[in-house]
């Protein structure tokens, strides 16, 4: 029986012209691929936006058939210590490799570079200087502030942002067509809602729903992704804001929690749903509700993730509704 390939890998772009989203950033990388003069680079942005993929595509376009020998890819989440810099990276930088005419540099790609230890980063800046004639470094990270200043100053910083829903949907439709996935429109809307501009999450969600249920619709997507359905959360907020009934809101919340959702999952969906201005009679009330949800999120993030926090949040929303409703 053949092992199914994750669609994230199966449909990962191989060349710069295939990369989706961040058009201005990708255009800069295409110029580098065309001219061949690659600087040290730091690619920063949220997960699933194409940082590592873009760098691999750039390396492939630059190096062609020499890609395997001239590229060292390390995930700094695993390989992040001082010995990695001293051994793996330095040995690679010292190795002589035949390169194509358009590129005179080997490439070291460090994924999740913001997980590297401070010592490893300090050692790396010296390596970058010593082998600058033969080797270029590319750092992919979510939080650029965790990279030390000396490394940042040696790199061209390239920012990635979350993909738009249209860009994610375009790629999803391409995969759906290739894999013959049955779907309905609300299923795609649910995937976009879950992904929030993260292409990796969107493709994983699509594949998991298709594998688990066959049909991609909203109900199946929320079941697979283990997130509370927004309509249930909207019903709870309506009970607080419109009906001003704490008893009904508690009843709906208990029903939601009985399905096994953790408070952290519930509160994140509350925040997404609460941003819809159609739920409130006034903007002042919406601001107050968002503030209450934000404070509860902070407490849950600090480790106080009990159902009591959610119950108190509902009570405060009802109180605000009674005070601010016309």
Image (cartoon, grey):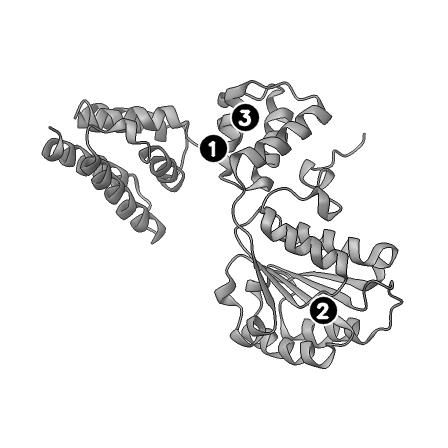
The answer to whether residue 15 is visible is yes
Identify the image quadrant of the C terminus: top left
* Residue 259 percent coordinates (x, y): 40, 28
The quadrant holding residue 11 is: top right
> Looking at the image, which residue is at 52% across and 51% down?
46
Answer with mark 2 or mark 3, whichever residue precedes in sequence: 2
Would you name the residue on which mark 3 appears? 188
Horizontal side of 9 relative to 224 (left or right) equals right
Classify 219 as above or below 136: above
* Residue 234 percent coordinates (x, y): 32, 26
Q: CA distance from mark 3 to mark 1?
A: 9 Å
> Looking at the image, which residue is at 80% across and 32% down?
2
Q: Are marks 2 and 3 in contact (CB under 8 Å)?
A: no
* Residue 69 percent coordinates (x, y): 85, 62
Residue 193 is labelled as 1
Horizontal side of 315 relative to 48 (left or right) equals left
Classify 152 as above or below 310: below
Q: CA distance from mark 2 to mark 3?
A: 40 Å
Q: Given this view, does label 2 or label 1 mark the residue nearer the observer? A: 2
The answer to whether residue 304 is visible is no
Residue 179 is labelled as none
Answer with mark 2 or mark 1, whichever residue precedes in sequence: 2
Q: CA distance from mark 2 to mark 1?
A: 38 Å
Q: Residues within 10 Å of mark 2 (few under 14, many from 20)?
A: many
The quadrant holding residue 181 is: top right
Q: Given this view, does label 2 or label 3 mark the residue nearer the observer? A: 2
Residue 136 is labelled as 2
Q: Across the whole image, how many numbered discs are drawn on residues?
A: 3
């Amino acid at each position: 029986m053949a092992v199914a390939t994750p669609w994230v890998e199966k449909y990962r772009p191989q060349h710069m012209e295939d990369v989706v989203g961040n058009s201005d950033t990708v255009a800069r990388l295409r110029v580098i691929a065309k001219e061949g003069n690659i600087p040290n680079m730091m690619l920063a942005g949220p997960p699933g936006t194409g940082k590592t993929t873009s760098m691999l595509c750039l390396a492939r376009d630059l190096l062609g058939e020499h890609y395997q020998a001239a590229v060292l890819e390390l995930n700094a989440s695993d390989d992040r210590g001082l010995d990695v810099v001293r051994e793996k990276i330095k040995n690679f930088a010292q190795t002589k490799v035949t390169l194509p005419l358009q590129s005179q540099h080997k490439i070291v790609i460090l994924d999740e570079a913001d997980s590297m230890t401070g010592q490893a980063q300090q050692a790396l800046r010296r390596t970058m200087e010593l082998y600058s004639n033969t080797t270029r470094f590319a750092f992919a990270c979510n939080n650029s502030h965790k990279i030390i200043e000396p490394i940042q100053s040696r790199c061209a910083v390239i920012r990635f942002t979350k993909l738009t829903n249209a860009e994610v949907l375009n790629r999803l439709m391409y995969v759906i067509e290739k894999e013959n996935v049955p779907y309905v429109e609300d299923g795609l809307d649910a995937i976009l809602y879950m992904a929030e501009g993260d292409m990796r999450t969107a493709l994983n969600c699509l594949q998991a729903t298709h594998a688990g249920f066959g049909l991609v619709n909203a109900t199946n997507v929320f079941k697979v992704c283990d997130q509370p359905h927004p309509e249930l959360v909207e019903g709870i907020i309506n009970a607080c804001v419109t009906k001003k009934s704490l008893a009904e809101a508690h009843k709906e919340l208990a029903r939601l929690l009985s399905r096994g959702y953790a408070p952290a999952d519930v509160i994140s969906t509350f925040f997404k749903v609460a941003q819809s201005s159609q739920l409130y009679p006034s903007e002042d009330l919406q601001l107050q509700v968002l503030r209450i949800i934000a404070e509860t999120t902070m407490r849950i993030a600090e480790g106080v993730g009990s159902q009591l926090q959610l119950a108190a949040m509902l009570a405060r929303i009802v109180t605000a509704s009674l005070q601010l409703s016309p």
